[in-house]
Image (cartoon, grey):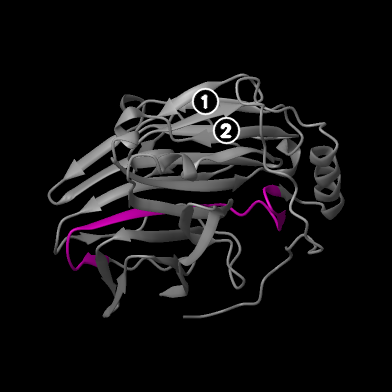
Amino acid sequence: MLDIVIEARTAKITPGFAVKRILPYQLRRMVGPFIFMDHGGPLNMPTGSVSSLDVLPHPHIGLSTVSYLFNGNVTHRDSLGVEQVIKPGEVNWMTAGKGIAHSERFEDPAMLAGGELEMIQTWVALPEKDEESDPTFENYQPEQLPVFTDTGVWMRLIAGDAYGLKSNVRTHSPLFYVHVVLEEGVRFGLPTGHSERGAYIVRGSVEVHGITYKAGQLMVFTKGVDPLMIAKEPTTLMMLGGEHVGERYIWWNFVSSRKDRIEQAKEDWKQGRIDLPPMDNEEYVPLPESKSKPAGGPPPNALS
C-alpha cells in the first residue's frame, strides 16, 4: 500500500529555469533522510538562452546535495575551490556541513548549441553529529557505481545499498538511491531492509494494486508492505529512502535540527561569513527578503 502520493509542483529556481518540485511537501517533508527533490527538464534551449538557467553562488548548511543528470552538462564551482563538470550518469555529492557556497552554470558547448538538459537534484539531511562537519565534495564516475541488468530491467545504484548491491558513494546515514529503467510489462519490487521507501516516476507509468500512477508522481510506500510495480509502458524511476534521521527544519537552502542554527546561517550569509567560490565570486544570490520562519516538525499524517 501507499502512505501518500505526492504530485510534483512547479517551482522557479532562476528566472529562466522552472523545475518540478517533489520534496519537501506539506504532508510529507522527508522520505528517509531525503528532504528535497527537484526534477529539472527535459529542456531544449535556443542558443543564447542557456545562461538564463545559471544558478548563482548560494549557501547551504546541514545537508548533502546530490546532483544526477540524464542529459546535458552542468559546471559546479564551490567555496572549497572545486570546479567540476558533471555529465550524465555521474554523481556530484556535496556535503555542506557547517557551511558551503556553490554555483551551477550551464557552459557546455553542446548546451549552447541547443542541446537537451534533464537532471534530478536531491538533498540528504545530515545526522545531528555531522551537521557541523567540515564541507566536502566528491564526483563519482559511472563506472564507480554498481549496475544491474535483467530481462527488461536496468538499474544503477547511485548511493547506499539495495537489491544486494552496495555503492561506494560516501554517505552519513543508512539510505538507498537508485536509477531504474523498466520495459513495458515488467514487474518490479521494492528494496527491503529500509524503513522508508519511495519511487518517483520520471517518465512512463506503473500500476500498483490495480491503480496506475504516472510521470511526476512520488509514491511513498507503507513500512513493511512490499507491493510489486508493473510497468505500463517503458518507464524510468528514481527510487529513494532509508532511515529517518529525525525531524528537520528547512528554510531556503538551509537544513538543521535547530531553528536557531538556521537563523545564524541567514546572518552568516548576509554578513559574508560563508565564502564564495574563488572561481565564481563576482555575483551571488542574496538572502531572500522573507519574514517566514523555518518550516519543520512532524507533518500531519495523510493517506492517498
Which is nearer the N-term, disc 2 or disc 1?
2
Q: Which mark is drawn over residue 138? A: 1
Q: Secondary structure at mark 2?
A: strand
Label 2, label 1: how far apart the Cα atoms are: 6 Å
Q: Is residue 183 above or below residue 272?
A: below
Q: Position of residue 279 (x, y in %)?
A: 60, 20
Q: Position of residue 12 (x, y in %)?
A: 53, 58
Identify which residue is drawn at 61% across, 33% down: 102
Q: Is residue 46 above or below residue 274?
A: below
Q: Which residue is mark 2?
A: 94
Furthest toward the front, the residue is 48
Q: Position of residue 134 (x, y in %)?
A: 72, 26
Tell me if residue 241 is in the magenta stretch.
yes
* 235 sits to left or right of 277: left
Q: Is residue 116 above or below residue 236?
A: above
Q: Position of residue 294 (x, y in %)?
A: 77, 59
Whether residue 240 is visible here, answered yes or no, is no
| Count of marks, rendered view | 2
Q: Amino acid at mark 2?
A: Met
Q: Which mark is drawn over residue 209? A: none
Label 1 packing within 10 angstroms: few (<14), some (14-19), many (20+): some
Q: Amino acid at mark 1?
A: Glu
Identify which residue is drawn at 51% across, 40% down: 54
Specify start and end residues of the magenta stretch as a single range.
229-254
Mark 1 and mark 2 in contact (Cβ < 8 Å)?
yes
Q: Secondary structure at mark 1?
A: strand
Q: Quadrant of residue 29?
A: bottom right
